[in-house]
Image (spheres, rainbow, N blue to C red):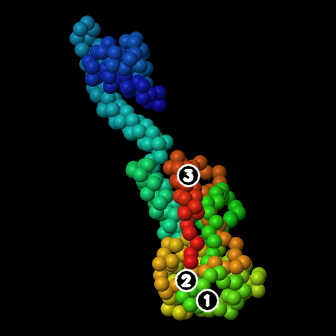
């Protein structure tokens, strides 16, 4: 049975449908002798005749063995056609993609990426997961947004420099830029000391600046709520500032820092050595387009 080929089953189906080898050949664009050869090869593979050939103008008749072979043959051909269609859709950009993200990317960048990807490929299956881990854990993810450079089995593409700003209750500092040294001993609300938050605090310490951390929380909205409540100020990246629309909040003020802190770097990662799907490649291209647009139009907080 391992010698049965799809072309044999295609020829058998055509003969069964048309009732003659000649009409089957015309339907398939073959010669009649080619169809006869395909049926002969099939009969050899299954060990018996699949058609009775009465000769003359009378139609061929399917044998009892042929009925069994034809039923399974049609099923195999349908599955092969379904597989071919699925492969074509995959190559065109459909299929499933799993993307890892973190909150400020989830709020600002990812919605634009998802919308454009769905517009181009309505049939795609997009799965998202949000978890900040240091070092990053790609697992079975196709793409992973991460705020920092990584070593190991990753390929990466830098998307964006995300500068830091000081967010404080209005009146806490004079309008305009604030010197980084002025943060020494100042009460601050901060993210947990992982990922780029850890690098930020290390850079402040290197400059001899040690804010007094009064509260840590993973949520940017909670950080800003505590700033509004007077718990302290916060140093946040620009994406977080804009996603919260701090500029429209009369109780808050965003200040540039002088000298500026090194910006947070946002990368797109994927596992090295893994063949990427066309959908993952297109998602990467869209992420580059989206972050370029964001970097171009994002005004500095005032």
Res 195 quadrant in image: bottom right
Residue lying farthest top? 56
Q: Which numbered disc, 3 or 2, marks the residue closer to the eye?
A: 2
Q: Counting other residues with Cα less than 10 Å from the Cα at mark 1, is it few (<14), some (14-19), or many (20 or more)?
A: some
Is the residue 235 above or below the residue 63 in the image?
below
Q: Position of residue 89 (x, y in %)?
A: 44, 42
Residue underneath mark 1: 173
Q: Quadrant of the C terminus?
A: bottom right
Q: Mark 2 or mark 3, which is nearer the start of the sequence?
A: 2
Which label is found at residue 285? Answer: 3
Which label is found at residue 220? Answer: none
Residue lying farthest front? 175
Res 207 quadrant in image: bottom right
| SS assignment at label 3 | helix
Identify which residue, 80 or 297, lies in the foreground.
297
Residue 266 appears in the rendering = yes
Q: Mark 1 or mark 3, which is nearer the start of the sequence?
A: 1
Q: Position of residue 197 (x, y in %)?
A: 64, 77
Q: CA–CA distance between discs 3 and 2?
A: 35 Å
Identify which residue, 117 or 125, lies in the foreground.
117
Residue underneath mark 2: 253
Q: Position of residue 251 (x, y in %)?
A: 49, 87
Rendered residue at 43%/57% (across/down): 115
Q: Counting other residues with Cα less than 10 Å from the Cα at mark 3, is it few (<14), some (14-19), or many (20 or more)?
A: few
Is the residue 279 above or below the residue 212 in the image?
above
Q: Mark 1 or mark 2, which is nearer the start of the sequence?
A: 1
Q: Counting other residues with Cα less than 10 Å from the Cα at mark 2, is it few (<14), some (14-19), or many (20 or more)?
A: many
Rendered residue at 39%/35% (across/down): 81
Q: Position of residue 58 (x, y in %)?
A: 22, 11
> Do labels 2 and 1 touch, CB within 8 Å?
yes
Rendered residue at 50%/63% (across/down): 110
Residue lying farthest left? 58
């Amino acid at each position: 049975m391992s010698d049965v080929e799809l072309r044999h089953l295609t020829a058998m189906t055509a003969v069964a449908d048309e009732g003659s080898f000649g009409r089957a050949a015309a339907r398939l664009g073959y010669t009649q002798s080619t169809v006869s050869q395909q049926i002969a090869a099939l009969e050899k593979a299954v060990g018996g005749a699949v058609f009775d050939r009465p000769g003359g103008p009378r139609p061929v008749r399917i044998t009892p063995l042929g009925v069994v072979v034809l039923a399974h043959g049609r099923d195999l051909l349908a599955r092969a056609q379904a597989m071919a269609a699925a492969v074509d859709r995959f190559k065109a950009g459909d299929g499933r993609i799993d993307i890892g993200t973190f909150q400020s990317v989830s709020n600002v960048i990812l919605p634009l990426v998802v919308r454009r990807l769905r517009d181009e490929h309505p049939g795609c299956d997009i799965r998202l997961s949000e978890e900040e881990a240091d070092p990053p854990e790609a697992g079975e993810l196709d793409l992973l947004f991460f705020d920092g450079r990584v070593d190991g089995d990753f390929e990466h593409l830098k998307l964006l420099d995300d500068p830091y700003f000081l967010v404080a209750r209005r009146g806490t500092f004079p309008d305009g830029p604030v010197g980084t040294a002025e943060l020494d001993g100042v009460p601050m609300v901060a993210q947990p000391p992982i990922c780029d938050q850890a690098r930020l605090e290390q850079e402040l310490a290197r400059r001899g600046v040690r804010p007094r951390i009064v509260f840590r929380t993973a949520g940017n909205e909670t950080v800003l709520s505590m700033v509004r409540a007077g718990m302290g100020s916060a140093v946040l990246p620009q994406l977080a500032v804009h996603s919260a629309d701090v500029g429209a909040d009369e109780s808050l003020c965003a200040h540039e820092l002088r000298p500026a802190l090194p910006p947070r770097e946002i990368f797109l990662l994927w596992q090295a050595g893994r063949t990427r799907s066309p959908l993952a490649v297109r998602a990467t291209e869209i992420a580059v387009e989206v972050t370029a647009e964001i970097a171009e139009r994002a005004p500095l907080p005032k």
